[in-house]
Image: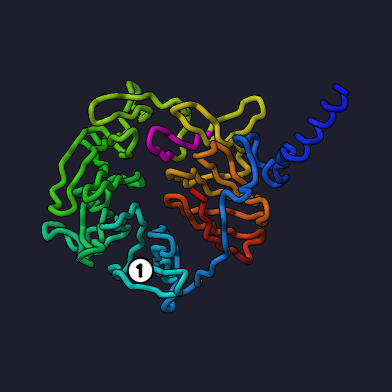
Amino acid sequence: MKNYMCSLLLLLIALFIPSCHDYTVPVSLTEYYDSLLSPTDIDGKIEYRKIMLPDTLKGYKASYTKLYDKSTLLTCLYDEKTYLDKEYGFYNFDTGEYQFLFSLPENLSSGVCAINENYIILKFFGLNAQFLPDSQSSSSVAEGIYAYSLHENHLFCVHLFSIDSESKQVEYENYNDVLLLGDTLWFDDFYANDSGKILVDLYCTDLKDLKPQKIEENAQNPFYYKNQVHFFVHDENWEYKVFCSLDGQTTKVSAEDLKGIAPFQDNFYCIEHKPDYKELLYRFIIKDMSTDKILASCNSSNIVASLKATDFFVSWNNYADHVPCIYDRKTQKILVFSNLPEGNNRFLIKENYGILFQLLPGYQSKDIYFFERKK
């Protein structure tokens, strides 16, 4: 009788509790990634749908750069022959409507650095004379930071990078990040001292009054981490492998070669490019440097870049063909879009939603998806 009751109990458990099984990671992922943190299928946690984005608008090629809200993308229109940018606008992929924002001066390219509900921050490359101060020669060429006010519909100069007095050229190309917090913009500027050594200083300015203040010498690449503004400073070897908060707390960078950072709240996500002397190759390691937890590791045949983080996700772009995957901060797992095809995957994310651009093998076609995680 006792054995019968035990068998009955086991049968009831089998009927009412789903069986557990290991998730089979797609081969296209295991081919490139040495490790993925607890990979599993999106399995209802993320819902997605295919959307259509036009390749051209108003006769120009369209490049979709930032997510503004759940249906709107900041869009740059550029000349396909010269690759010079013409204008920016908002494209609503639910309605198919394009809203013009502003035109760019002739003969330049641009890059979007940041966006919030009030401003779009850009860097201009190859500026022409109309944007330069009267004191500079009309033949000068500069690079600078500009802002567009979404409330006042106005494009204005924030800062022109330091220019060599003889060559009239920017002294050092600046590809560092800027930090936009409300109406305040943090940025850096490189310059050469009297002996020709390249130095860099950190600035901030209120975008309402445009009075830049030098905050710190020999400091660069501002970012927001643990509810404070931080920035990189050099160590005793003049290598920028230390970051510092405004109140003076310093942290040594443990990564050997940083290829991207995405600090968010108390986590410091980064991409480390690290040599593997045993296998005689380099690896890209995506990890949280604050805990040393590795989210993903891949060999150098799969280049990863453009690390981003929100409350819900950590994403990166991959340049080898595999099914898309993204790190879910709530479950602390890699979520895999198992039913989507292999491809080069580019993400734009905001809060709990995003856009996935898939360039399919052979670069002949692409698919675009809107996705949203259930809260």
In the picture, residue 76 is in which quadrant? bottom left
Q: How crowded is the residue under tag 1: few (<14 C-alpha within 10 Å), some, or many (20+)?
A: some
Query: Between 125 and 243, which is closer to the camera in this rendering?
Result: 243
* Residue drawn at the location 56% of the way across and 51% of the way down: 46
**Residue 307 at x, y percent in the picture:** 47, 44
Left or right of 369? Residue 30 is right
Q: Is residue 123 visible?
A: no
Left or right of 362? Residue 232 is left
- The residue stretch that appears in magenta: 261-273
- Vertical comparison of 131 with 219: above or below: below
Left or right of 183? Residue 126 is right
Task: Describe the element under mark 1 as helix, strand or loop.
Answer: strand
- Residue 334 part of the magenta segment: no
The residue positioned farthest toward the bottom in the image shown = 59
* Residue drawn at the location 53% of the way across and 54% of the way down: 346
What's the amino acid at mark 1? Answer: Gly
- Residue 266 part of the magenta segment: yes
- Vertical comparison of 293 with 128: above or below: above
**Residue 320 at x, y percent in the picture:** 62, 49
- Vertical comparison of 85 with 300: above or below: below
Q: Is residue 297 visible?
A: yes
**Residue 272 at x, y percent in the picture:** 50, 34
Query: Between 58 and 27, which is closer to the camera in this rendering?
Result: 27
- Reading the image, the residue beneath label 1 is 89
In the picture, residue 361 is in which quadrant? bottom right
Main SS, magenta region, reads: strand
* Residue drawn at the location 31% of the way across and 56% of the way down: 122
**Residue 274 at x, y percent in the picture:** 54, 31
